[in-house]
Image (tube, coloured by chain):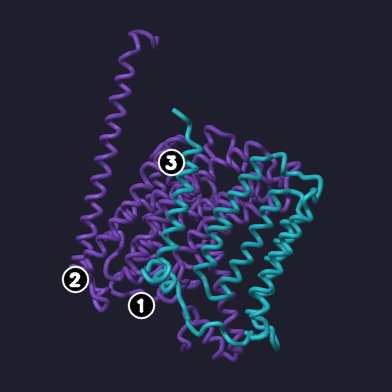
Chain colours: A purple, B cyan
Amino acid sequence: MQCDNIINTLAPCLVQSGWNGDLANFASIFLGVIILATFPLLVTIVLIWFERKFAARIQDRLGPNRVGPFGLLQPFADVIKLLGKEDITPAGADKLIYNIAPVMMVMSVLLIWAVVPLSPIHVGMDLEIGALYIISVASFGTLSVIFASWSSNNKYALLGAFRVVAQLISYEVPLALSLLIPVMLAGSMSLVDITQAQAGMWFIFVAPLSAILFFISSQAETGRAPFDLLEAESELVAGFNIEYSGMKFALFFAGEFMHVFTNGVLMAVLFAGGYIGFGGLENSIPLLGIVFLFLKASVFYMLSLLIRNAIPRVRIDQLMNFNWKFLVPVSIVNVVMMAFLLKVVQALGIAPTPELANDFVANIPQTLVLFAGNVVLGLLVMNTVSSRIRKERLQESANRAIVPMGAGD
Amino acid sequence: MNFGEGLTPEAFAFGLFTILTLGGALGVVTSLNLVRAAIWLMLSLFGIAGYFVLLSAPFLASVQVLVYIGAIGILFSFAVMLTRGMTNLKERFNDQWWLAGLAALTAFVLLMVGVIVPAFGNSGAPVSDQVTTTVDLGVALVSGNQYVLPFEVASLLLTAAMIGAIVIAREDD
């Protein structure tokens, strides 16, 4: 590789200035790891401020507005406050595991960033199993919840964790199943290949149902409203993190905030073309790819915030019913249907040829067929659900009719 | 990068994963606290995932983490946490320790004789010159003349197990 500029080609530039080749490579990778691990944490600081402002506007409040212009320095004030808090370790706690758990929570989210292609040339590691890797590292998050709850030596924490783990494990099923669709469409599990395959057409138009399913289940994976049973502030004291204080408590929340934005990034990469912008601009100026990616991620992030603030919390039985009786069957049917339609499209010969895969027009016939399939399936599902709900409602009113008049007074 | 004669990064990583695997295994059998033993077990299994990475089998490494740490490890910790009486054991051995030791020794000897000894000495040459990718693995699992039957039988078995679990867990009504 040729030395071009210091951001895109650091290692060759270091060699040119007289560094040893191996050392230059090591330095470049080391720096990349540090930046990649620090950057999401820094973004989170801004996101916390943004989320509080956003929620405040929805609830007809002002939100943080005292520290700095528009309250922009509020997160820093919070961090200083949290650092000053007493670091409490409960009696009988398993100290080592108690201290590892919050770190693991943040780690499980940060590890995802390692495979996300930020721009055509900036990618931590182009794993050929990228999509599977994302699901694998997510299990560290579940594990950290178990660690935190058990090591706290508190029965409320343990009970909270049982709820959370049931939720996280259940929602991994539709998450993985909807992740299969972009993998199928791109013919690869590597996130770089998935992004490149969307140069002609974003997968959100080819497979809108999978995008919705992925979005819902990833929202549940973060454990936020309407799925925030793990720390339902108005019902429980707190969930698995009840014994944590100060910065360790904050790490759990940093992990959660970061997870929401990371999900936005994943949505952008898997369904909205990742770093691909317009007119191939990202190829001439790679750093613009990061801007495009983050713009797309922000749209999904805002949608997630909107849902969080607009929809009330579900009960645990509703949560499980919604997953196992709605999301899982729909995503299984979706996978089967998409696989079938893809084969049909190939058999009919309207799939874009490999040479034309990046062409918008060549992608249109295939997209139309798959989109129509998605719409039909979506309508069928909505119809089934609404007739089912109507039946339940009739049942309910029939039950009510038996109760004698005035019995409820 | 080279750390000196013979100490390649691969050898370094191999040593690290060996420490993780063996240290974790040692922790499992010596830990008096069963939850800690479960965590040691996860560490040991993580070391195995590292071996898969070194063997250029990233798919297996990822599945190792997903299945053994993400699913089985969590299941183990759950089972242990729900049986509170087992979390703090007083004694390291029970009466059947020699039986367990014999079984472990037999398995170890069988492994040594069956796998290690035949392969010992011819370390330089690769076992096969075929380079396989995750795509090859996927194709092998579903192609008619390779592993489609074992694959289907395994899925059927797992489905049967799942249905069995549902039948047992269901309340009679």
For residue A338, above or below residue B87: below
Residue marked by disc 2: A349
| Any part of residue A11 in sight | yes
For residue A88, above or below residue A259: above
User: Which of the pair A16/A409 is nearer the observer?
Assistant: A409
User: Which of the pair A72/A370 is nearer the observer?
Assistant: A370
Instruction: Give the foreground label among 1 and 3.
Output: 3
Q: Circle 2 — which element?
A: loop
How many numbered marks, from 0 up?
3
- Around disc 2, counting alpha carbons within 10 Å, would you say few (fewer than 14), some (14 to 19), or many (20 or more)? few
Mark 1 or mark 3: whose residue is earlier in sequence = 3
Q: Split into 4 quadrants, where in the image is the N terminus of chain B?
A: bottom right
Residue marked by disc 3: A226
For residue B79, above or below residue A374: above
Mark 2 and mark 1: Cα distance apart in space: 31 Å
**Amino acid under label 1?**
Asn
* Residue A26 picture quarter: bottom right
Residue marked by disc 1: A283
Mark 2 or mark 1: whose residue is earlier in sequence = 1
Residue A264 at x, y = what percent?
42, 57
Residue A282 at x, y = what percent?
36, 74
